Image: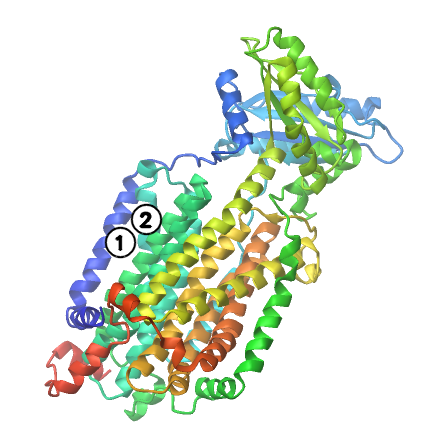
Amino acid sequence: MATFLYRLGRTAFRRRWYVALIWVAVLGAVGFGAAKAPAAPDPNNSMPGIESQKAFDLMEQRFPGAKADGANARIVFVAPDGQKITAAENKKAIDKLVDEAADGSQVASAVSPFQANAISKDATTAYATVTYKVKADDLTDASKNHLEDAIAQAKKSGLTVEVGGTALATTPAAGGSAEAIGIAIAALVLLITFGSLTAAGLPLLTAVLGVGVSMAAIMALSSAFGLSSTTGTLATMLGLACGIDYAVFIVSRYREERAKGHTPQEAAGLATGTAGSAVVFAGLTVVIALAGLSVVGIPMLTKMGLAAAGAVMVGVLIALTLVPALLGFWPNAVLSRRSRKTGEIKEGGENNGGSRWARFVLRRPLPVLLLSVVGLGTLAIPVTDLQLGMPGDEAKPTSTTERRAYDDLAKGFGPGFNGPLTIVVDARGATNPKAAVTTIEKKIKTTDGVVSVSPARFNPAGDTAVFSAVPSTAPTDTKTQDLVKTIRNERPATEASTRAEFEVTGTTALNIDVAHKTQNALIPYLTVVVGLAILLLMVVFRSVLVPIKAAVGFLLSVLAALGSVVAVFQWGRLASLLGVETTGPIMSMMPIFLVGIVFGLAMDYEVFLVARMREAYVHGDSPGQAVQSGFRHSARVVVAAALIMMAVFSGFIGAGESMIKMIGFGLAIAVMFDAFIVRMAFVPAVLALLGKAAWWMPRWLDHILPKVDVEGEALTQQSANAPAPPAHHDPATQESARV
């Protein structure tokens, strides 16, 4: 492995123009393919294997022509204090709004609250429903402006008017200026770490190029593989993160080899052969974590994982080829300013901050280990109270009209009104379908926790009916989850007596089912990902205990991060500092996302840090000296990489959307725990206590596992046995070296 990559790095350095042109051609080709590709299909958000999805599928089958996915607007009216919504002036203003809304070219129907009896018991609140012929994304600006103008006119009458639904829903911003500040901080960290604008800019340039290639490829393949624009979200995030990390480690090792007196081309080859080997295996661990998302069984998540895995592999290829090629163009520009001025290349030192910290941990391994484990374990305690769900309008800031509409409906009609349950009855097997549906309606209406049941609506064939049941509690309340469970548990007896089958669906039930599905998939996902990663790390480190230690450390960091997310976003601890206005259940996908992304980044840091320790141990250092050597060479770069990731992820905390805040906070704090507590404290403490046993592997297992030379031992022997190579007379290199 090391020898092959060494040759690849030297070739890329020497043939830099060819390599650069190849990547430009690849970018142009996939860009052309993306421009010519058909429009991306609408995202398929189906959730196979859950009851809610089966019920939706049955509705589409039995109610032909029904457009369940059309845009809608629920316009909520609140009368001024002391007035009723049924007062003549208020009724006139509402009817006028409904009539104007109905005139829209894309409107399917507009129903007045006085027609649908959508008025609260105290007559202070009412709502009108506007449905459209097209999806929300296909609504024209003219249609939106038409509805907004009608609402503005109604507000002039003194009514409070708010709008929920999908028609005018605000699109959540990722992070705005805060995200830009995060990227600027990342650039500053690189500049401070390397002391060179070129060295700081090169990782950013190659990472952006890699993301560009990956996103263009996703767009080009969108129609063939059913990929949507949302598929690339995770690919962009991880492609950028890993791309920067991998380039940073190659550039750092190149500077280190130059400091040892190697020529630029030889240094590029050695950097690619050693740090590049670590890049390959770090990338493979990330790919395992992302491909493992298919275990969850959600098609959208599987596509996102595979697309992101492809982006990471592109980042690996760019780090192994384009980075050494760019070093060929500017072999001295990536060195520090002091090195360029004095001509004396120094990189780090025998007594830098990393080695001093390593010696501190080696002197006190047990206290450091106990402190790190207890600290992370304490932070993980809130995980025991984890509640998964899918926050809706109630989680949006109060500055949005959707949130205010949600609150007004909850106040006027009860908290459960915003999340009614949809009951789909399949009465094909019943002797009298209408009587069977009536029996089921009465049974559900008498269930504790149900406030009201709507009249059933039959399909044209008369063998399938749909009706709604309004819970007494909010959609994300645990009592609503219990209600859905109760209805389903009591179903067999009702079905037996009526010979009709029914299922519970609707947005609330769907969110409950998805949360249950992802929660059940978390343990199998962890088992698959961690198990495969342990095998891969055994191949890399030729050790049994080091991979197990890596897996335990990762579990500590991810559980502590998830516990912190629960404490802030579910319990409300320090929520005001992050601008979180409403607490509630944790997004269903959050644990899976957190495990997948953080596992990939954690294994990056593990491979880069411990690979240097393994390299030093193989080359003759004692276990303690190997730990010091690994920290001396890699600690600064690992810290810089972690700070970059924290800065980028923290940008999402500035978003107005609670779910985006949650993702940004969770990822940023997980990286902090893993890099600064697990990799900097837990790892060296465990290795210090294990000593030589850390690198032990049974002979039979050593013979079975494939041999890969990640440490570059073959390169060291080759360098020791071979005579000094003659200087490479490359005019371009000589010219650039004088720059």
Which quarter of the picture shows residue 79? top right
> Where residue 557 appears, x then y in whole percent?
53, 65
> Where residue 415 appears, x then y in whole percent?
75, 36
Q: CA distance from mark 2 to mark 1?
A: 8 Å
Q: Which residue is mark 1?
A: 27
Q: Which residue is mark 2?
A: 216
Q: Is residue 278 left or right of residue 682?
A: left
Residue 200 appears in view = no
Between 396 and 600, the residue placed more toward the observer is 600
Image point (21%, 71%), residue name: 9
Give above or below for 568 relative to 402: below
Give above or below for 407 relative to 490: below
Q: What's the mark number on residue 542?
A: none
Check disc 2 and report its element: helix, strand or loop.
helix
Give above or below for 106 relative to 6: above
Which quarter of the picture shows residue 653? bottom right
> Where residue 89 appears, x then y in whole percent?
81, 24
Of callouts 2 and 1, the N-terminal one: 1
Between 368 and 140, the residue placed more toward the observer is 368
Between 127 and 310, the residue placed more toward the observer is 310
